[in-house]
Image (cartoon, rainbow, N blue to C red):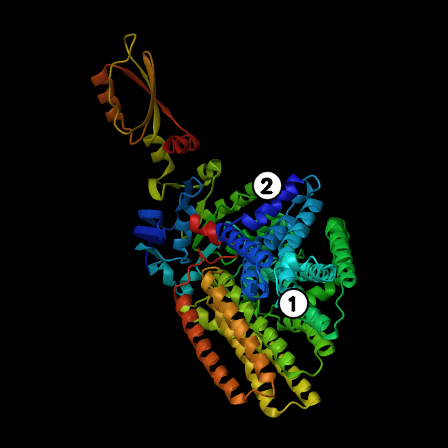
Amino acid sequence: MTSTTVEASNLNKAFGEKHVLEDMSFGISPGDVIGVLGKNGAGKTTLLELMLGFTAPTAGAVRVFGHESYNLPGDIKARVGFVPQQDELLDQLTVADQLRVIASFYARWDSALIDRLCSEWGVNVNARIKSMSVGERQKLSILLAFGHKPDLLILDEPVASLDPIARRQFLEQLLTLSTDEKRAIVFSSHIVSDIERLANRIWIIKEGRLDWQGDLDSLKESIVRLHIRGTGPELPAFKIPGVLNVRRDGAFATAVVRDWTPEAQETLEKSASVQVEVETLGLEEIFVELHR
Amino acid sequence: MKAVARLVFTYFTGAPLLRACTFVGLALIALDLYFVATQPGPGEKLWLAVLGLIFLFVGSSLMPVTFGRLARSHSIGVLPGGRFKLLLSAFITILLVALPVGLLSQGMSISGANGSLPELMKDPRVRDFVLGVAALTFTSAVLFAGWLYLAIWFLTSQRNLAGLFKGLLVVMLLIFAPARDIHDFTVSLIWNLQQIAVLWFVFGAGFLLWPRFKAARARRTRERFAGLARVLTGRTAGREFDVLLGTANPWLLVAALALPLLLMVRLVGEVPSAWLFFLTIFSGVTGAFSGQAAERSRALWLRGSWSRAELFVAVERSIWRHNAYVLGALVLVIVWIGLDAEFPPVLLAAGFSLVMLGAVLSTYLGLMITRGLRWPEIVAGVVVMFSLMALGMLAGFETVDLTTVFALEACMIALAMAFRFIARRRWMQIDWMVCRPDRALTARGA
């Protein structure tokens, strides 16, 4: 049995002429909680659905528990849970019926867990699905992905339609699930604070490429804002490696840089005779700066 | 009026292809009108008018879809006079589509006469006759186009049993009512105007008052029919695959076909060709359900041990289990009518195989839809349906040699096998990012 949950190499996906994902390589291990960030249309959903085998890569490969995702065998599928961006519930059923239908597909289904979550999340099992609000439907979709206690849980913007209380409950549940070191979780979201709170690894997708992958602390150490102060009335000319953007104002300048190191700071201070203060950025600011 | 005009304009020009159809249709109609006004014997150019009308109708086919979407949207409730303007725009569109029929009928009514229309119209008797025919044709066209749009609306906006049932009823009326008028010679301008007034009053009132009615109905229906709904939709144990695929309860489709079948008994009588014609339509509908199978199978992929090829087989099996009940009901109807009307056994055999063929062809045509509904499937669907209906009518005529019918049926069997082959190949490469309920375009862009 392989120790890697998901492994992708040189993954490419195009729809006709449109290249959605380009040359992505990554690995997901048990215990990883990966937050996927990206602008609308960056390719988040395509990436997640490639992992699920819904679609085939144009080039490269993605393997889930050692098997090619496009041809996942049944025992591997039973170890995967998925919450789609838009629910795929059957309107004519009640919540209890829908739960029963999905549970019947799995050998291990934790009814006690689902009953408890239904009660905690205020999901009425007798309600007919077509009469439920968007948020309630989303809660049910999440429950359907939890019930068989998957080893790989993939969630595509799961909290987009939840109210703040439901969102908090969901995140708490996800935190509980993430404490299981055998389980890997991948979730995309536009709510950066949720990713900051939950994820131990961040993926930032930009124009179909994996622009950054690593843990949150490394990201925060790597992408920083520099406050540069010269000694005279005007700043001397200087060059900063990995600069994302720079703004000059007389003797002062601010710059956002990536791959920043203490050595780079020392070199800049000595070569340009300037003082450099480093400001750590929040994830949201980093995301914005990377897309500026 | 600005909003109404904008809506009508959008219906005819909202998509590039439909815009082209509208302009081609208008050009052909204008050309035919020119011939009507300037040349003697304009009836010979009738094909121009018919072609133009078909183009114009296709050009306006955005109307029922747009109308349906707006009517169900929440925003229509907050737009000033939203529902009324929407209703008015639909009515005007129908008048516009029907208008050329009335105009062109003038040419038809003097077909074969010496002299052009303006010359002939100088005679008051001819003028009265021509204008009378024009008014009668126009009002008939308004009625016919109204029903046709309604059927399109039901069949495209409600992709469920309710939509199918309503669509079937309208299609039956659409085929039957004009035929009866022609047969019984009951059509008159007054009768047409009465029908238009009553139909639009009822439809308009229902449409405008629908939001209030819906709220009250939902409350009452929930209370009254909760138990019945549970019986019809709640049986899931042991048939979960079918539930997710939408094939768990064939009795719903049998029930939805029952009323149109009863109407047929009442309306068609014992004419073999008419019977086979309608039964072929019904059998086609039976299989058409499979058109949603690819979309629905997305939910099944992660929940079973099937490969894509195995999933196709499992889906195929589930659909045929579902169809078997409905086909069984249709075959019983054939036998019952056949015995009652004393149809020859060979004709019954031809009818039986036609009904089976209808279901098989439409099932595999539906299973071929793995990348959303595209032009090739639409064209194949229309061709197959018309071929089956023609074959149904052909089989019913006493003068036709049934060997010919059986030979044509053999060709259709070959076509069905080709459809299955294509469907299976497509399922082997099914891409659920492209094939997902109502999200094909979004998926392609994500």
Q: Residues within 10 Å of mark 1 (few under 14, many from 20)?
A: some
Image quadrant where one finds the C terminus of chain A: top left
Q: Specify the subunit that label 2 lies on.
A: A
Q: Residue at x 47, y 65 (%)?
A: B377
Q: Residue at x 23, y 14 (%)?
A: A273
Q: Position of residue A206 (x, y in %)?
A: 37, 40
> Label 2 sits on what residue type?
Asp
- Is residue A124 visible in the rendered image? The answer is no
| Residue A226, quarter of picture | top left
Residue B173 against residue A82 in the figure, above or below: below
Q: Which residue is mark 1?
A: B171
Q: Position of residue A103 (x, y in %)?
A: 54, 62
Residue B243 against residue B222 in the figure, above or below: below
Q: Which residue is mark 2?
A: A163
Q: Residues within 10 Å of mark 2 (few under 14, many from 20)?
A: few
Q: Residue at x 63, y 76 (%)?
A: B278
> Label 1 sits on what residue type?
Val
Q: Position of residue A80 (x, y in %)?
A: 44, 57
Q: Residue at x 62, y 83 (%)?
A: B331
Question: How far apart are labels 1 and 2 at the CA level?
Answer: 46 Å
Q: Position of residue B7 (x, y in %)?
A: 61, 45
- Circle 2 SS class: loop
Q: Is residue A270 left or right of residue A121?
A: left
Q: Specify the subunit that label 1 lies on.
A: B
Task: Check residue B52 in the rendering and tell me which mark sits there, or answer none.
Answer: none
